[in-house]
Image (cartoon, helix red, strand yellow):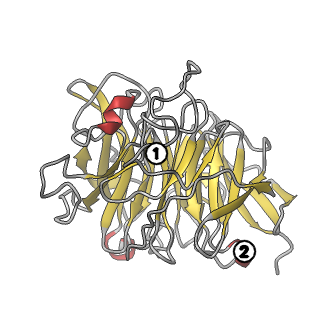
Amino acid sequence: MTDARHRSCAISNKSPVRLSRLTAFLASAVFLFPALAQSDEEVRQEKTERADINVQVLASGLENPWSVEALPDGAYIVTERAGRMRIVKDSKLSAPLGGLPAISAGGQGGLLDIALDPQFDSNRTLYFTASITGDGGRGTAVFRAQLAEDGSRLEGTERIFAMNKFTGTGQHFGSRLAISTDGKLFFGIGDRGNGERAQDPDDHAGSILRIEKDGKIPSDNPYGAGGEGATEIWSIGHRNPQGLAFDSKDGTLFTVEHGARGGDEINIPQPKGNFGWPVISYGKHYSGQDFPGGTSQDGMIQPEYYWDPSIAPGAIAVYRGSMFPEWDGNLFVTALKYQLLVRLERDDSGKITSEERMLKGEYGRMRDVVVAPDGALLILTDESDGALLRVSRANAS
């Protein structure tokens, strides 16, 4: 196992919120499934440091899939960056769901993350992020909708948030969603290619944000009362956070975000926290220049962990499943650049102590990772012919 390369953050985030995205139990539904694409039914066995695993291709033929959620009847709902949402069931892809809003796909933008409401079994509500067009160019937005009973379309789709400054750039839209047990939506937006925006608390770019499920502003948001920043903002100084997840055991919120040439980071977002971009970083500018503040500055929070060189992280998950008890509390991070899955071990204090690199180069660029209700890992590969993978225990009864 590789020695950990990290910096410990002295400030913890032991709030009472807990992960709901990965543990929500959903009602079964009847779906319509044209035979558009099927998985190769490929299952490969791999050895890892803690357990032998099976990797199964559940479905292929997805165009740059970005996010997946598990449904309790064995189906999965998947987003494709090009602007489509599909259901995967019995190794088949549904036709694209109807009812989606106008989405601006291009560059790094398009249809992005999806999260299921904790009461989906009664309200069939889900949330998703996407890039859209508006005054000044493009920006990140959050939507709420209900999945129709037959699974063929979204109903009642409404936009509940849009970032406050649109620009013409095509990168760094973010944006994962995570739902706390008190019903708040957390999500990230990248700096949109302009690092200085991440240091402006009045600008949504380069931030982690927190809103109610109807888009209203929580009364206890950190910038809500003092007028010192945009009321939706939770923390600033983030370059491009594309992973966000709660630990269901203690409520810690983790984000993983892209650096430039090195300096990919895992952080624990905190109210009014400043995580330093673009003043400090453990990487370098693409020009090769160092960052003006070096690697640390007063008032700027250190990452929990960083990579140099960069792995280009796609998503993060905290493992609390039953299938792999030896992974309990581990962090899993997908990597685009090195086409692998990273497993990070933590000690009793939560400090990251070591990492293992799994599945390197065998399945392509890895975008999303979530823990399914049965404890398996679900992974999406970010390719023009992308796949949904399931990682389960090998030789299990």
Q: x, y (%) of residue 169?
A: 38, 23
Residue 356's place in the image compared with 100, above or below, is below
Write down the quadrant of residue 138 in the picture: top left
Res 88 visible: no
Of residues 58 and 334, the one nearer the viewer is 334
- How far apart are the alpha carbons under marks 2 and 1? 27 Å
- Residue 126 position by quadrant: bottom left
The secondary structure type at the circle numbered 1 is: strand
> Looking at the image, is mark 2 or mark 1 earlier in the sequence?
1
Q: Would you identify the image quadrant in which residue 48 lies?
A: bottom right
Task: Return the residue at label 2.
Answer: 324
User: How would you rate the neighbour count of disc 2 (Cα within 10 Å): few for under 14, some for 14-19, many for 20 or more?
Assistant: some
Mark 1 closeness class: few <14, some 14–19, many ≥20 residues within 10 Å: many
Is residue 375 something that shows in the picture?
yes
Say whether marks 2 and 1 touch (CB < 8 Å).
no
Image spot of residue 359 (x, y percent): 78, 50
Where does residue 214 sit, x and y in percent of width and height? 21, 60
Report whether 198 appears left or right of 222: right
Say whether residue 188 is left or right of residue 307: left
- Residue 182 lies, with reference to residue 286, above or below; the image says below
Look at mark 1 in the image and give the residue it sits on. Answer: 241
Report the side of 320 relative to 42 (left or right).
left
The structure residue drawn at horizontal position 53% and vertical position 55%, both measured from the top left corner, is 68
Amino acid type indicated by mark 1:
Pro
The quadrant in which the C terminus is found is: bottom right
| Element marked by disc 2 | loop
The amino acid at mark 2 is Phe
Camera-side residue of 126 and 1 = 1
Residue 343 image offset from top left, x and y in percent = 70, 59
Of residues 52 and 27, the one drawn nearer to the viewer in this rendering: 52
